[in-house]
């Protein structure tokens, strides 16, 4: 009987605590939510500027082991903001974004050097020539060799 009474006291106590938390949450206004969203969006665009600088000027995409956490560290933010930038502002995944830059770089190498495909894949940040050819064909609609031949003829 005593144990049942103690159990009901605990249940009543936690229910009371839970109601006070819900009350605090319901007191917040939509203005607070809007203000927090605006802050997050301004941080997002700042993260976007930093990421663009990393990709355009520092060519961080050439690192074959590049990860979202590397971008987050380089921009001084967390992975959540970096991932949100790619999903919302860039409207693509992290890997699609990186591969787009790598393929642009590879296209330049294909047109201005006589290096073989394996070397170009390596210099462009790909771990293997097979993944380079697959991604290149997906993005450009043709193989790297055909691209080079068509551009030089």
Image (spheres, rainbow, N blue to C red):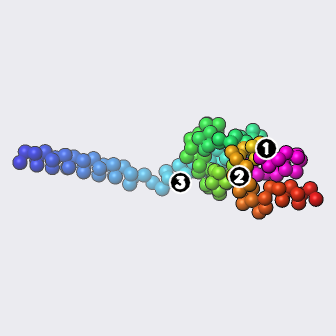
Which-is-in-front pick, marks 2 and 3? 2
Q: List x then y, in percent, for residue 96.
A: 67, 54
Magenta range: 101-120
Residue found at the far right of this picture = 153
Q: List x then y, in percent, for residue 14.
A: 24, 47
For the image, the number of numbered tags is 3
What's the distance in space between the residues labelled 2 and 1, CA to CA?
12 Å
The residue lying toward the viewer, choosing from 26 and 84, is 84
Tell me which residue sits at (55%, 46%) in the image: 80
**Which residue is identified by label 2?**
130
**Is residue 10 part of the magenta span, yes or no?**
no
**Which residue is identified by label 3?**
34
**Which residue is identified by label 1?**
119
Tell me which residue sits at (55%, 51%) in the image: 37
Q: Closer to the N terminus: mark 2 or mark 3?
A: 3
Q: List x then y, in percent, for residue 31.
A: 50, 53
Q: Which mark is residue 18?
A: none
| Element carrying mark 3 | helix
| Element carrying mark 2 | helix
């Amino acid at each position: 009987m005593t144990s049942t009474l103690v159990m009901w006291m605990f249940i009543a106590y936690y229910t009371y605590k839970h109601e006070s938390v819900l009350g605090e949450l319901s007191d917040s206004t939509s203005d607070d939510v809007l203000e927090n969203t605006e802050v997050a969006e301004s941080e997002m665009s700042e993260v976007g500027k930093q990421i663009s600088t990393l990709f355009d000027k520092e060519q961080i995409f050439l690192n074959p082991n590049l990860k979202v956490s590397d971008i987050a560290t380089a921009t001084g933010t967390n992975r959540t903001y970096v991932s949100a930038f790619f999903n919302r502002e860039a409207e693509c995944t992290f890997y699609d974004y990186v591969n787009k830059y790598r393929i642009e770089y590879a296209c330049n190498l294909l047109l201005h050097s006589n290096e073989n495909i394996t070397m170009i894949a390596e210099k462009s940040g790909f771990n293997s020539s097979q993944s380079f050819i697959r991604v290149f064909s997906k993005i450009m609609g043709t193989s790297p060799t055909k691209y080079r031949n068509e551009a030089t003829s």
